[in-house]
Amino acid sequence: MAADGVRGFLKTVGLVLVVLAPAASQPPNVIIMLMDDMGWGDLGANGEPSRETPNIDQMGREGLTVTSMYTAAPLCSPTRAALLTGRLPIRNGFYSNNTHGMNAYTPQEIVGGISSSEILLPELLRPQGYTSGIIGKWHLGHRSPYLPLKRGFDFFYGSTNCHLGPYDDVTTPNIPVFRNASMIGRYFEDFPIDKSAAVSNMTQLFTEEAVGFIERQAPQGPFFLLWAPDATHAPEYASDKFHGTSRRGHYGDAVRELDAGVGALLDALRRSGVHNNTLVVFTSDNGAALVSKQDGGSNGPFLCGKQTTFEGGMRAPGIFWWPGVLTPGAVSHQVWTQMDLFTTVLELAGVTPPGDRHLDGLPLTNSLLYPDHLVLRPVFLYRGDRLMAVRQGAYKLHLWTFSTPPEELSVGINFCPGAEVENVTTPIPTDHSDQPVLFNIEVDPAERYPIPSGSSVYKKQVPVLLEVVSEHLTELVPGEPQLNWCDPAVMHWAPPGCEALGRCLEVPPSDPTLCVWPH
């Protein structure tokens, strides 16, 4: 569909409310490519000197690049929950308040998962005729009520957790891989991963499954695909074909294979003749995990990495691709969050968002179609249950700062290696409420030079941002925390489908305890 055609059936009302006219063709297919721990600076288009992402870079040349794409949390599970609900983790319950201001996620001993009160994107798209699939990492709860096919997805190939291990199946079971509602094997056993050599064909399998999904669904009607491979999450892996081909070691090998997977999915869209009616989004669940050192990615000019609310922890790549609709090679300085993908996809699909809850995502179709169209909006950056910072326009205000706890620094864990900023990269949670730390994030993306508190800019901008924070906290109704309780009995001892394979393991006695979140 040509850009003029899309603009012809989109009617803008107020801010960016878009309504599909009755005569419109079928709503677009949507693919969200969600990488795992891949940094903003890992793309050649963003300055990575080895230029080992030709397909992703080509996406940018053929589509729209957004310079400010934020995740909803500085780590995996809460980000994924926010993307699929359009709501901050503090609202949708994907956080813990066991220890204030600490990151929580879904290890296999977690009792909870995505709340039944939340409405996920595929559940809203289904009445519009969409078929939805997820391939790769789910990470929103692995017990039966939380599995993808119970939450609006029609197809699932991948795992409920990351590929961590190998475990001994005695104290800790290896992670299962699912096809739809049943496990078909386990990582390291039926799906080999050689940790020492960083070799596995999992990305190849995830790519083949995604291509197959596209080819099956393209003739049938609109589809939504969440492609979420996890190869760049430590321990990294790549197949034999890509092993040893990067200048950046095992991590670079994984990036190169993921880039090839991006190319394969786009080629499948072209072969199927649906590329002009498919919006593809490329992004990552958080910034690069700098704690992995040479086996981690790059956050480019941004401060720190995964686990922190500095720019390097929550600023992700953002590329939109939709041939014939988006202006090729365009760059947008609109500030996005991944929660905006929820509302923007609903907008394009002609689906009315649920009106019984607060949505943090904005419908930003106009910012896709018109790259110069900018909407001033706040972005709230949380670490666990604590609001750490807010960005609006060019300015970012830190209410709290926290990098890496001293006990972790003492054993070589560092989320900000080589990047210490006095009074900013603080090793303990530090409250700046009385005198917030202000940056012009467009001028100083590395957050190295706070704006002096006596300056006219500080005196002008801080009250504005504090008012934004006050409004947010006044209307905030936190969701019931889902990540508080852990229990060894809920681990992957007997996942659905294990009976048919004869692979069920003995379930230990239940022993629920409050989860411990160290950072």
Image (spheres, rainbow, N blue to C red):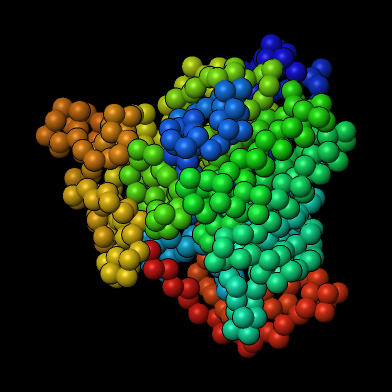
The one nearer the camera, 149 or 235, is 235
Residue in the picture at 69% in, 17% down:
324
Residue 258 x, y percent position in the rendering: 62, 45
Task: Name the residue furthest left.
Answer: 454
- On screen, residue 435 versus residue 198, left or right, reads left
Residue 262 lies in quadrant: top right
- On screen, residue 88 versus residue 383, left or right, reads right
Q: How many marks?
A: 0
Residue in the picture at 59% in, 18% down:
328
- Location of the N terminus (image quadrant): top right
Residue in the picture at 49% in, 30% down:
45
Residue 85 x, y percent position in the rendering: 61, 47
Task: Name the residue furthest front.
Answer: 244
Residue in the picture at 42% in, 58% down:
292
The one nearer the camera, 517 or 358, is 517
- Location of the C terminus (image quadrant): bottom left
Q: Work out whether 420 lies above or below 219.
A: below
Task: Name the residue furthest right.
Answer: 220
Residue 350 lies in quadrant: top right
